[in-house]
Image (cartoon, helix red, strand yellow):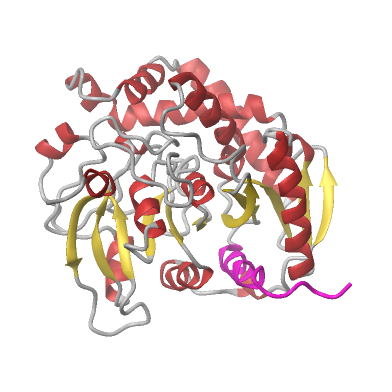
Amino acid sequence: MRSADDTAVWRERGDPLVAGAGAGRLRGLRLAVKDIHAIAGYRIGAGNPARLAEAEPRPRHSWAVAALLDAGADVEGIAQTDEFAYSLNGTNAHYGTPPNPAAPGRVPGGSSSGPASAVALGEADVGLGSDTAGSIRVPASYCGLYGLRPTHGLVPVTGMLPLAPSFDTVAWLARDPGPLARVGDVLLPEAGAAEAVPPFHTALVADDLVALAEPEVRGAFAEAAADLAARTGLRIEHVPSVGGDPAALGAAFATAQGAEVWECDGAWVRAHPGALGPGIAARFTRASEVTTERRAAAEEVVHHAGRAARSALPDDTVLLLPATGGPAPTTDETAERKAALRDAAFRLTCLASSAGLPCLVLPRIRVGGLPVGLAVIGGHATDRRLLELATHAQAPRRAL
């Protein structure tokens, strides 16, 4: 009989659920696949039992699942997600909250909550999920994992349930940088001339973004950034801002994203009153109220911030920032407090999403014994070099 925790982590699980090719560079790697990726013969439930009950088995795998199976990885199972992947907390009103072994009694973060929990528990080696506005980066931060949101459009999203297509990416996380990079080697395009440039030289730190974090995180972030620079040869440069006012961008991004979410899922939500948990239902209600005028104004803010961020990050430069404003909230936090923590995380994650840039999360910050991720945003298509940076970050500090 499956435990409550097991049900909160896994929707379907096998030994494995789907076996990979008999040979390949990922042979033996166990995947926890978020319940928005198509797996042939199985339904997509998107974290909602009503949707699952109506869904038909998918005829083929998503592009990412197929690529990883062909490379020898096994699908251990289908992991739970926040409903419709539209949250950052990692709680689900229907299936429960997956455990966070790195911070017991606290949420794992979402919406790739099931894959993150499975990886942190050691029940999978890599969690295959998605990242629209932080759905890999937040759980990586809360669970002490490595995570990568790739450059928008670099990894095909074919066969993955859309949330907000202008910002959706396939994304993944792992306990160690090796498996994270091995999956990237399969999913990312072959390295070209843009990837052959020298390593990153400069690390920007934007003061307005760091200020969004809790005071204890700000101090720990400064130490972690200095340590990363010492290990990798990066030169830290402080700047007032990258991308403009984070609060204004967060509000605009939420509006632009919400408009697309409603386009993708609004008809289903309208046809199924009462099917959503209260927090997700409220979010969909706000999405339904976005007017054409509000959407256009919000998209202009998002596009302006994205252009500014891309301009600030040439091939040799990265941006360092806390992945979240603090450690994971406790599972019994009030709804108001969880919403406030989600908003703080959202303001930190939406810059990379607005710019379509890759973002690596490193588990290099501890606050009160709890993990917080160090986020590294790179320039367009520098994904492979970010994965190399994750490995180099483990090297001994360089002599001054």
Question: In the picture provided, is 272 more to the left or to the right than 183?
Answer: left
Give the residue at x 38% y 66%. 125
Give the residue at x 28% y 36%. 96
Q: How far from the left and from the top, in percent, is residue 347?
A: 60, 33
In the rendered image, the residue lying farthest to the bottom is 23
Identify whether 244 is placed above or below 178. above
Identify whether 58 is placed above or below 16. above
Q: Is residue 24 visible?
A: yes
* Quadrant of the image occupied by residue 274: top left
Q: Nearer the viewer, residue 69 or 364?
A: 364
Give the residue at x 50% y 70%. 181
Question: In the picture provided, is 324 more to the left or to the right than 31?
Answer: right
Say if the magenta span includes residue 399: yes
- Residues in magenta, as a range: 382-400
Give the residue at x 50% y 16%. 293
Q: How far from the left and from the top, in percent, is residue 43?
A: 15, 48
Identify whether 250 is placed above or below 353. above
Q: Is residue 255 visible?
A: no
